[in-house]
Amino acid sequence: MSDSPAPPDNRTDRLGTERVGKLLLEFSIPAIVSMVFNTLYNVVDTIFLGQALPDGSGVAVTTLAFPVMTLLMGFSMIAGQGGNALAAIQLGKGEKDQVERTLGNSATLLVGIAVVIAVMSGFLIDPILAGIGTTDELWDLTKIFVQIICFGFIFQSLGMGLNNFLRTAGRPNLALGTMIFGTVMCIIFNYLFVIVLGFGVAGSASATILGQACGMVPVVWHFTMSKSAAFKLRLRCCVPDVKLMGNILTMGIASFVMQVASMLVGIVLNHVVSLYGSTDPIGTTAAISAIGESQKSAKFAFTPLIGLIMGAQPIIGFNYGAKLWHRVKKTLAVGMLGATIIGTVLWVLIMVFAAQIIGFFGITDAALVDLSAFALRVNLIFLPIIGFQIVGSNYFQATGQPTKSIILSMTRQILFLVPLTLILPEVLPGILPMFDGLDAVYMAVPCSDFLAIFTVGAFVLVELHRLNKRIAESKSAAQLATSEQAAQPQE
């Protein structure tokens, strides 16, 4: 298979020529909106079950299942975002045949992972439920929800995984449209199954996987049937290539680690909140519901920042592959500025309307709303600058530096947040008696954010120095070539 440069394609080649700010807006706005809609799957389940089961059990079930859904998203991202990051770099080098092989092998990985998860979930469902901290009173309901989500994971795996490639293929609006379509169908199915037919958690879980299936179909159709596709999903390119699959997984491992870290944090939070909630007047179920609502609201706030870097990834990767170092640096700088602006706007809205945001989940108990709103405000106190951390850590994935990306993905949640979640509830009430154990759990998040921001800052400073050096070398080489051409005798 030839690795020679492919003919020019205006939809993709403009990643290396068009104004960076314009490209970032064009690619990031659809990605931000699509991430918001993707996050709505769990939020939609929570809202409908909160309305249908006003005792809070429905909200508690989606909270308990949240770490599992987070892990499943990680499995779709390890091959989807990893393959897309590799494809963007290959496209910058003009290797279109390699891009199609990467797309095909990514699809094979996504299907294989989904099949393994569906099979394993049947055997390991009880250990999974115990691991996420499921209580006896919520065991049966949570088991139904989690099993349905796992059995239907193939729709999310292929749909969300391959959706990443649409941006690199120059179709960010199509990527957005498929996400919106899937989420809208999830809402419709939830209303039908949960509200109209009264199927409860089984209906909500079924609505989720059917919505994801609706979002998957147009993505697969575009890469297999559309004549306008910049590159195709071809059967011959789906034949497993062990080395290529290894590269895809290596590029995507940072995204997976980030999702695993979120899952671990969710599990630790479920256990810690259950422990301190049992001794608090609010009770265990209410405490889990409160932390769940604040978690979901916080995750919803982070999605625009994640969408921003998803839009920037193909731009950074293409220019990195093409060795256009000044464009790589500019995209990183503009991305960080955009993340700061978005984070600041969201921070203001959350600080002012925290109670209203929590009330959106159908919870009316005043004490529960106050506790959840307090947790939300504390969790997101550093939101204006946490975008710097998200953009900085994901930059290294986009440029084929997975080791650095993995380290930075682990710092915020695994290395900092998990230990702080376990330690602060034991230590903080003794230092500041006005805060109890539950309050201390929420305060672990901003402490972790503060440490992570400085860690990423150190890595980014080193990278900027390296980029500046490469920019200077490129200018010197260009000047030398110009001088040699001018010195040549004219015919």
Image (spheres, rainbow, N blue to C red):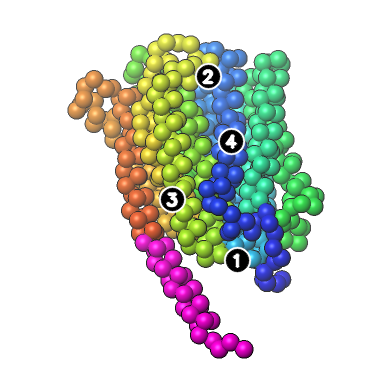
State the mark number for residue 33.
4
The part of the image, by quadrant, that contains residue 197 is top right
Q: On the image, numbered disc 3 is attached to which residue?
A: 333
Q: Earlier in the sequence, mark 3 or mark 1?
A: 1
Going by the numbered disc 1, the residue's amino acid type is Lys
Q: Which one is in front, 439 or 286?
A: 439
Q: Is residue 436 magenta?
A: no
Gap in Å between the C-alphas at discs 4 and 3? Answer: 22 Å
- Judged from the image, the secondary structure of the residue bearing numbered disc 3 is helix
- Residue 22 rendering spot, x and y as whole percentages: 56, 47
> What is the span of residues highlighted in magenta in the rendered image?
465-491
Quadrant placement of the C terminus: bottom right
Q: Are marks 3 and 2 in contact (CB under 8 Å)?
A: no
Q: Earlier in the sequence, mark 2 or mark 4?
A: 4
Q: Residue at x 69, y 33 (%)?
A: 181
Q: Are marks 2 and 4 in contact (CB under 8 Å)?
A: no
Quadrant placement of the N terminus: bottom right
Q: On the image, numbered disc 1 is attached to which residue?
A: 93
